[in-house]
Amino acid sequence: MIFSPNVTWQKNNLRAVFLTAVVLFSGTFPATTHAETALPAWAKEWLPTGSLRNSYWNMKHNASGANDIGNANLWLKITPHLTENITLVAEGWARASTTPTSANISNSSQTISRLREGYLNTSYGAADFRIGKQIIVWGRADQLNPTDNLSPRDNTQLFVEPDDQRHGTIAAKATYNFTNAFSGLAASAIWLPVFRPNIQPISPPAGISFTEIIPTKDQYAFKLEQTGREIDWSLSYFNGYDLNPDLGLLGPQNLAFNHHRIRVLGADAATVMGRYGVRSEIAYTWTEDKSGDDPFIKNPFLYWVTGADKTFLEYLNINLQYFARRVTDFQNPTVIANPQLGPIAIQQSIISSQQDGFQQGASLRIANKWFNETLDAELAAVYNFTRQDYLLRPKISYAFNDHWRGNLGANIFRGDDGTFFGLLKNRSAAFAEIRYGF
């Protein structure tokens, strides 16, 4: 599944990336300059906020060594008012990366950029409208969200914060906010004319090619949501395409990434019980394999998450969740005798978390703060009881002042090769980042 040959970072290349970042970060970037205060109010709204980030990732590609990657990033966001009730929201990033390709070949460099969001937002009375490229996040559970099917992620991008991997998709969203006795209740309708899938860190084995098939038909979703009451909750429905692909066979040496249509009925709820925050989220997904006998299309499945968190002392927060997935009409892919189709069906079951008719596990997040909230530490973990594979994500962050922040941490994937997290072992990485916010 994974990546190119690994090598050891050469000191001269590391120094070159570091010096580039120093130049980028060397300005003082005062919060308010004389030129800025002289600008009219409408012009100030066009001044961007954002951050400059420099990070290093030690990625272990195979057992023989490591491949370090240096990234210099610029993130910008603007939210100007175009008229009295129309706001433009635009956010994007640009990155310069240096990746060594061989111990005897100079580093390869690349510059990429992405507009994460770019949409118009307006309100008329009790109705809100948003049109353009936007990130739409559903679900109240912590990170594990069965109802979150609208906005894709680029899992090939190395970011300290997992949510930074999200990027928007073209959509039109209308929300009506009820008043009086139904205050806090909102109904939303979403139309997505363009499908954008999750981008996965998968490289084909030697002699094999991948062809990704992108659907072109519309998608739509509806949501009824209650907030501001004793219990916050929502009901949702999505009719569109699976962000994650199913594996198919186009030819002897050509695999297909197919994004089949799915329908998802979901619900979530959250409340506070004393010092405990309690939340639950559940969704049933109908797939195109209604009878469950096609090994190259996910079976319909039920996926739910439930958990609670509590803050001890002043800042110590512990969040524990249980998750489970039940596959309808499960059929074991290991019984397929065809030597060409069997391995593909097994791989498909791994990446779709459908190796078993019932899987369960737990997630844990422990976070604390010290020194007047300048030092943060967090440990996040996901463990699959059924297959005993897991993810660990420790991180420590320190705010030197109002602008400068440093981050240290790692993403650690472990498990047998025939498990979901086990397939990602070569994506394990330690990271260090310095960030300047303005």
Image (cartoon, rainbow, N blue to C red):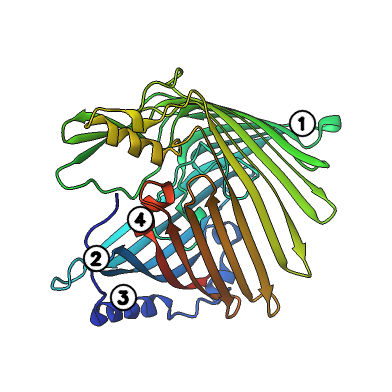
Q: Amino acid at mark 2?
A: Asn
- Residue at figure coordinates x 38%, y 80% from the top left: 22
| Mark 4, residue position | 113
**Observer-nearest residue: 10 or 381?**
381
Q: Amino acid at mark 1?
A: Phe
Q: Secondary structure at mark 3?
A: helix
Front of the two marks 1 and 2:
2
Q: Secondary structure at mark 4?
A: strand
Q: Amino acid at mark 4?
A: Ser
Dividing the picture into quadrants, the one containing residue 235 is top right
Image coordinates of residue 366 in percent, x first then y, are 64, 63
> Mark 1 and 2 residues: CB-CB less than 8 Å, in contact?
no
Q: Amino acid at mark 3?
A: Val
Q: Secondary structure at mark 2?
A: loop
Question: Looking at the rendered structure, which numbered label has been put on residue 6?
Answer: 2
- Residue at figure coordinates x 51%, y 62% from the top left: 393
Q: CA distance from mark 2 to mark 4?
A: 25 Å
| Mark 1, residue position | 178
Answer with mark 1 or mark 3, whichever residue precedes in sequence.
3
Front of the two marks 3 and 4:
3
Q: CA distance from mark 3 to mark 2?
A: 19 Å
Is disc 2 surrounded by few (<14), some (14 to 19) or many (20+) residues within 10 Å?
many
| Mark 3, residue position | 17
